[in-house]
Image (tube, rainbow, N blue to C red):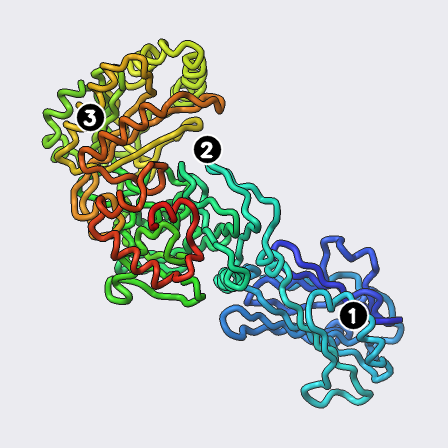
Amino acid sequence: MELGFVARVHDGQLSAHLVNAPSPIGLPRDTIGSGKPSIELSRPVIHYLHYRHQECQEHSSCNKSAVTPATASHLGDSLLVSRLSLPLSCSRVPGCDRTLSKHGLIKAPRISKRIQKITVLIIVPGNNFPKNRLQKSFSELRKLGKLDLKPPPSPEPSGGWAFLCLEICNQGRTSRVQGIEGYRFRNWANTYTCQPELYFEPLSVEEVRQILEIAQQRSKRVKIVGCGHSPSNIVCTDDYLVQLSHLNKLLKVDKEKQQVTVEAGMLLSDLNEELALLGLALSNIGAVSDVAIGGVIGTGTHNTGIQHGILATQVVALTLMTAAGEILDCSESVNSEIFQAARLHLGALGVILSVTIQCVPAFRIELQQFPQTLTEVLNDLDTHLKQSEYFRFLWFPHTEKTTVFYGNHTDKPIKTTSNWLWDYAVGYYLLELLLWISTLFPRLVPWVTRFFYWLVYSAKVTQVKRSDKAFTCECLFKQHVSDWAIPINKTDAALAQLKEWLDRNTDVRVHFPVEVRFVRADEIPLSPCYKQDSCFINIIMYRPYGKEVPRMRYWAKYEEIMRRNGGRPHWAKANSCVHKDFENMYPAFQNFCSIREKLDPLGMFLNNFLEKAFF
């Protein structure tokens, strides 16, 4: 009878089964794929294996001598080695010659995604096992890794031993690196799609490096995608698309500095929960939290508050893998020029691996909502900005109506008015139905706007929420959006021009709201707020039940007004700008281009979106 060893990899874990083992020890064939592996390696701290012979339940001597304890140790950062010695006879207890009643199982904290190689040593008593028969027995394992027969490292008990050394590369990880064919990417709004040649979800930094090596060898381009929330083709590619969803760990917490280091694939929503447990928070975040950290900083995500910059201004350090596979540590003191550029990187400089973020003590925000006219808000704009740390307002086109939102730190207890009836039955389902009806009868659009303002937004409301809950909101159903930043002193002029055009062109019906937010100046080369306090004006056209609504006249006039007032587009959102436009809009644009060409001279990280910007 030959000694067989079957290994399987599932979800990054390797399970190994002994089958057809010579008497007296063996595992039944039906254990293969039964979910009861004899060996499962998944953690750095591994408990001892204990085998109990079926006929030896009462013999403690047999229990002690049946198995040499398994041991494990780290070799480097990502190499896990386990040595398992299985004596295939028990000389102390006569008749102990059947099968094991229980499978040994190694358990401990997960490290499966970091395992690259596992070495299993099996010691078979007696030299009567020809090496060629052992090699033949393990032919299946050659598909998983390299098999060698080696002499024992030290003298063994008399009688002789056949020593089997098996190296198995984690094929779960390798298969991921090989990529998936036929994957179709769609962004959240279902407005942009692509079908890359290969789609990857790497499990480690080393696998990211392997993907870049493969791309370089095959002259392929690589784009990194987060959660696909950007309403543009910024991540679309026909070559390799990579999602870092498995690189989503909290790596380090510095309580003294109130800083955390996270992998770039971590979701902002998950980070918010981790910070809450630590008594920390971010001073400001975007309106959407189901987004990846690497993507959030890559596109210039912002919210509101003239004392606060875009989210990337909270980043104090990051690590970046270049097209050549080199990992750069970047901060104000190390690779400072690259650091500034990488804080809004557009996916054009390399792969962001980790980000260190400056936090603040956890806090709550009191939200006050009240109605005003557009004229009143613009006349008192300076007062609003001084009275509220997180000030914004919504304008309802085809009317003079606005809703003002104040947000300020508070020690008051949590108090919320949220409920399913208003937030979803009315604010989602009824609104989508009415907007769909208005696609058949466009004259209803202004009526729907006025009705919902009266129903939902005209009342005075006060709430107290945990900070991250106060910043975020429900995106409702699918939509087109455009968002530009203009110098803050152009706010009233730009809104007045947009309102005047809509009042004159009554055949153009647009959806509410126009959201107006305010952000502090910064020094990030491609930031829309580069060296100027800014007002972001965001317009929207919903797609009720996926139906497209005419918007191009509105979009074109809006962009014209934004350009006329010194505007810069939000990088995540579709716009008509080309290279010359960006050169005129961003004083440091050429500096960013020089850094990009140095880090990615062959253009591995380019796509159609970026080529339009850089060439």
- Amino acid type at circle 3 is Leu
Note whether residue 204 is visible: no
Q: Secondary structure at mark 1?
A: loop
User: Where residue 182 appears, x then y in whole percent?
Assistant: 61, 45
Q: Is residue 531 visible?
A: yes
Residue type, label 1: Phe
Q: Secondary structure at mark 2?
A: loop
The residue depicted at 25 percent of the width and 63 percent of the height is: 336
Residue at 35% over, 13% down? 445
Where is residue 83 drawn, in percent x and y?
Answer: 65, 74
Q: From the image, state whether disc 1 or disc 2 is nearer to you.
A: 2
Q: Answer few, some or many: residues within 10 Å of disc 2's Cα (few below 14, many 20 plus, some between 14 and 19).
A: some
The residue closer to the viewer here, 424 or 183, is: 183
**The N terminus is located in which quarter?**
bottom right
Real-space CA distance between mark 2 and mark 3, rounded to the nearest whole angstrom = 27 Å
Determine which of the numbered discs, if any, sits on residue 191 in the image.
2
User: Disc 1 or 2, which lies upstream in sequence?
Assistant: 1
Q: Is residue 239 left or right of residue 356?
A: right
The relative height of residue 6 versus residue 560 in the rendered view (above or below) is below
Q: Which residue is mark 1?
A: 138
Which quadrant of the figure has residue 420? top left
Vertical placement of 126 versus 477: above or below? below
Q: Quadrant of residue 458?
A: top left
Q: How many marks?
A: 3
Number of residues whose C-alpha sits closer than 10 Å to that of mark 3, classed few (under 14), some (14–19) or many (20 or more) = many
Residue 432 to residue 387: above or below = above
Q: Which residue is mark 3?
A: 495
Neighbours of disc 1 within 10 Å: few (<14), some (14-19), many (20+): some
